[in-house]
Image (tube, helix red, strand yellow):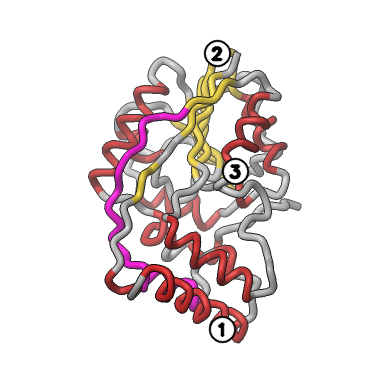
């Protein structure tokens, strides 16, 4: 029985809410390939529909992926002409021998895992000495974080994450350092957001995002309206706001 958030219900719209622009996909792939070259094979936990892993595989990186959601993995396989190995598996109990991989990737996943430090320990176990773990905790803009925080406050003071708060990189650094890993920030990548703040608020109101899923409809709508009011009060009309985003990955070098 997993204690992680399963994304079965999001499979039909996941790519539209978590995808990157074409330019950012290329820039992120370049960044990660430079770190992973000579360190294959590479495992992605929470591989989902393959938004990160598929472009890397197309560039020749030998990938493997695990996810707890079978529908998400089926979507990945539908998208791939030459699929890499995938498995239904929990990141806190990886079905691999010690040192099976030269590198690992975790994007937008530790906040969904209650025992996220256990997932860190598993990555440190399955990645061989001298390998690397690449992590992108999350990428909301300050305006969207303000909206999320107000929504959660009105919805009863619930937390955004059952696991690691994506903003707490110090906690992530400490967890990785317990396994001897040294952290460093990679060059950030500017991204252009296709959706507006207004559309993000609309998604919040209808319950697209995992942190809204266990909020009843009436409370969810009330909390979303409060979030909308907070944004308008602090930043202006949600339909008109421009939000530069910096995609910030961290690399952890294992001893």
Q: Is residue 101 left or right of residue 36?
A: right
Which residue sits furthest left?
23
- Up the image or down, 217 lies above or below 30; here it is below
Residue 201, given in percent of the width and then of the height, sits at 43, 73
Which residue sits furthest bottom?
218
Q: Which mark is residue 130?
A: 2
Disc 1, disc 3: CB below 8 Å?
Answer: no
Q: Where on the picture, by quarter, is residue 254? A: top right
Q: CA distance from mark 1 to mark 2?
A: 50 Å
Q: Which residue is mark 1?
A: 222
Q: CA distance from mark 1 to mark 3?
A: 28 Å
Q: Is residue 187 magenta?
A: yes
Q: Which mark is residue 168?
A: 3
Q: Residue at x 49, y 72 (%)?
A: 204
Residue 133, given in percent of the width and then of the height, sits at 53, 28
**Segment colored magenta:** 185-206
Mark 1 vs mark 2: in front: 1
Callout 2: SS: strand
Mark 1, other Cα within 10 Å: few <14 / some 14–19 / many ≥20: some
Which mark sits nearer the N-terminus, 1 or 3?
A: 3
Callout 1: SS: helix
């Amino acid at each position: 029985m997993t204690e992680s958030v399963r994304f079965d219900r999001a499979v039909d719209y996941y790519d539209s809410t978590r995808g990157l622009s074409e330019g950012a996909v290329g820039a992120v792939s370049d960044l990660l390939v430079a770190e992973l070259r000579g360190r294959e094979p590479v495992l992605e936990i929470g591989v989902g529909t393959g938004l990160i892993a598929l472009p890397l595989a197309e560039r020749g990186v030998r990938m493997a992926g695990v996810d707890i959601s079978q529908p998400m993995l089926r979507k990945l396989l539908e998208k791939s002409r030459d699929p890499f190995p995938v498995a239904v598996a929990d990141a806190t109990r990886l079905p691999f021998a010690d040192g099976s991989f030269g590198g690992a990737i975790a994007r937008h996943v530790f906040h969904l895992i209650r025992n996220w430090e256990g997932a860190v320990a598993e990555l440190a176990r399955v990645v061989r000495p001298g390998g690397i773990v690449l992590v992108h905790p999350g990428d909301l803009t300050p305006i969207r974080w303000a909206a999320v925080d107000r929504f959660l406050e009105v919805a009863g003071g619930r937390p955004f994450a059952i696991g690691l708060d994506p903003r707490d990189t110090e906690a992530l650094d400490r967890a990785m350092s317990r396994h001897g890993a040294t952290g460093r920030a990679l060059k950030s990548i500017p991204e252009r957001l296709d959706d507006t703040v207004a559309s993000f608020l609309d998604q919040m109101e209808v319950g697209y995002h995992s942190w809204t899923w266990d909020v009843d409809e009436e409370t969810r709508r009330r909390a979303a309206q409060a979030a909308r009011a907070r944004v308008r009060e602090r930043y202006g009309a949600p339909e008109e706001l421009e939000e530069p985003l910096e995609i910030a990955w961290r690399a952890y070098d294992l001893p």
